[in-house]
Image (cartoon, rainbow, N blue to C red):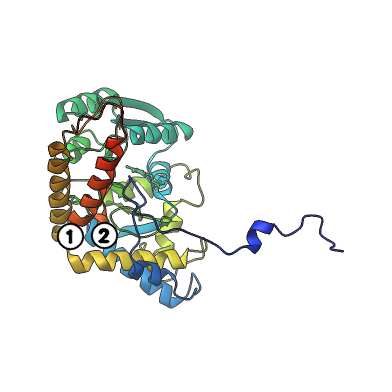
């Protein structure tokens, strides 16, 4: 007779089964064996010198990926949402203004997060599938005078890539920090954090980078740090407090790092390897490959008689990182052709 009233679950006595899937949606994307294997290395301590070396490599990789010299560049332990909250919770104090560009769900979520910390939130809404002009953005900045302006670069809910040109300069003219979400675009299309005047930029690990979900690269400009490190109030989250995180990641120039949380070391290994893959290919090559493959996909869809934006039914296809190849496009096209044969009003 067992002394524990809750028995071991039968399901756990069966072996773990995970199928192989082609991941051609908005994310996550497939993780190549090299990156998976990196994550299978032995667990070491989150304060061991070797993990600090790996974290330093990751920092350099993110600086390259983001095209930034920012000292405060690190990876948050968590998914893209964690980086989003890290940016907003640190950059905004209660009562300050946040302006969010809504061209899909990410602008709505950023507004929601800012509301939760007692910010005064305003939105500028783009038509579905559309973008905002710099004039519209400037008018809203002049009207609301926010401390932070949020914009999603790659809006994965509509598939729209928003231009960033000139917006950083506009934000600075109105003494506002420019926050950019590049979870769905980073590595697949040109973005220059420093040159484009972006103050806070984050991405995820699981899209173009092809690492498992669970780490989120983020970087803060000196202007952003100036504001964040001189706050009157503490950020609501201890876990995401940039003072703690920048010390753990060795970004604050202090001689020693203090325990903050147990860094997910195996996720760091995978992230490091994914950044190494990108460094080997080269950013420009990766941008070019994604552009070429996207163009091939778009013309092939059009030659099937499909339009790129369908009002009633939108299919979101993501071919990111190692999935961005013509062979993968051909697989998606074959599957779509097959699916369309079973549609009622099939015109093919
Ligand atoms: N922003 C964008 C543009 C995204 O596409 C996603 C993920 N779909 C996120 C943020 C959130 O990332 P995560 O699911 O990793 O939290």
Category of crowding for the residue at label 1, using alpha-carbon neighbours closer than 10 angstroms: few (below 14), some (14–19), many (at least 20): many
Residue 62 visible to an observer of this rendering: yes
- Indicate left or right for 212 with 338 as reference: right
In the depicted view, which residue is nearer to us: 264 or 1? 1
- Using the image, determine if residue 330 lies above or below residue 115: below
Residue 153 visible to an observer of this rendering: no
The C terminus lies in quadrant: top left
In the depicted view, which residue is nearer to us: 298 or 200? 298
- Using the image, determine if residue 160 lies above or below residue 247: above
Query: Residue at coordinates 37% horizontally, 31% vertically from top-left?
Result: 108
In the depicted view, which residue is nearer to us: 33 or 335? 335
- Indicate left or right for 219 with 130 as reference: right
Q: In terms of secondary structure, where does tag 2 sit?
A: helix
Q: Which residue is mark 1?
A: 283
Category of crowding for the residue at label 2, using alpha-carbon neighbours closer than 10 angstroms: few (below 14), some (14–19), many (at least 20): some
Give the image quadrant in which the ligand numbered 1 is located.
top left
Quadrant in which residue 34 is drawn: bottom left
Query: Residue at coordinates 19% horizontally, 45% vertically from top-left?
Result: 197
Residue 338, image x and y in percent? 28, 42
Residue 286, image x and y in percent? 18, 58
Q: In terms of secondary structure, where does tag 1 sit?
A: helix
Eye-nearest disc, 2 or 1: 2
Query: Residue at coordinates 27% horizontally, 52% vertically from top-left?
Result: 222
Residue 259, image x and y in percent? 51, 65
Q: Which residue is mark 2?
A: 322
Query: Residue at coordinates 38% horizontally, 55% vertically from top-left?
Result: 21
- Using the image, determine if residue 209 lies above or below residue 156: below
């Amino acid at each position: 007779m067992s002394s524990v009233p809750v028995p071991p679950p039968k399901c756990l006595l069966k072996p773990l089964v995970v199928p192989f899937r082609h991941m051609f949606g908005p994310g996550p994307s497939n993780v190549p064996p090299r990156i998976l294997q990196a994550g299978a290395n032995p667990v070491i301590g989150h304060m061991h010198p070797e993990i600090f070396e790996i974290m330093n490599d990751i920092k350099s990789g993110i600086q390259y990926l983001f095209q930034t010299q920012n000292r405060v560049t690190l990876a948050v332990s968590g998914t893209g949402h964690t980086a989003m909250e890290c940016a907003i919770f640190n950059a905004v104090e209660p009562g300050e203004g946040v302006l969010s560009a809504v061209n899909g769900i990410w602008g709505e979520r950023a507004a929601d997060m800012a509301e939760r910390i007692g910010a005064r939130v305003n939105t500028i809404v783009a038509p579905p599938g559309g973008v905002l002009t710099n004039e519209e953005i400037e008018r809203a900045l002049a009207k609301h005078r926010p401390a932070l302006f949020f914009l999603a670069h790659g809006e994965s809910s509509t598939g729209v890539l928003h231009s960033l040109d000139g917006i950083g300069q506009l934000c600075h003219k109105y003494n506002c920090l420019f926050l950019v979400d590049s979870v769905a675009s980073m590595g697949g299309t040109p973005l220059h954090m420093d040159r484009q005047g972006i103050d806070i930029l984050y991405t995820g690990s699981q899209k173009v980078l092809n690492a498992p979900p669970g780490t989120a690269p983020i970087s803060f400009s000196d202007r952003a740090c100036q504001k964040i490190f001189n706050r009157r109030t503490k950020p609501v989250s201890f876990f995401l407090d940039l003072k703690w995180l920048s010390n753990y990641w060795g970004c604050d120039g202090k001689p020693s790092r203090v325990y903050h949380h147990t860094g997910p070391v195996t996720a760091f290994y995978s992230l490091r390897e994914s950044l190494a893959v990108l460094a080997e290919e080269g950013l420009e090559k990766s941008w070019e490959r994604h552009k070429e493959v996207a163009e091939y996909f778009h013309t092939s869809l059009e030659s099937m008689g499909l339009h790129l934006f369908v009002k009633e039914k939108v299919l979101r296809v993501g071919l990111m990182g190692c999935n961005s190849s013509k062979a993968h496009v051909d697989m998606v096209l074959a599957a779509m052709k097959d699916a369309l044969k079973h549609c009622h009003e099939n015109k093919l």
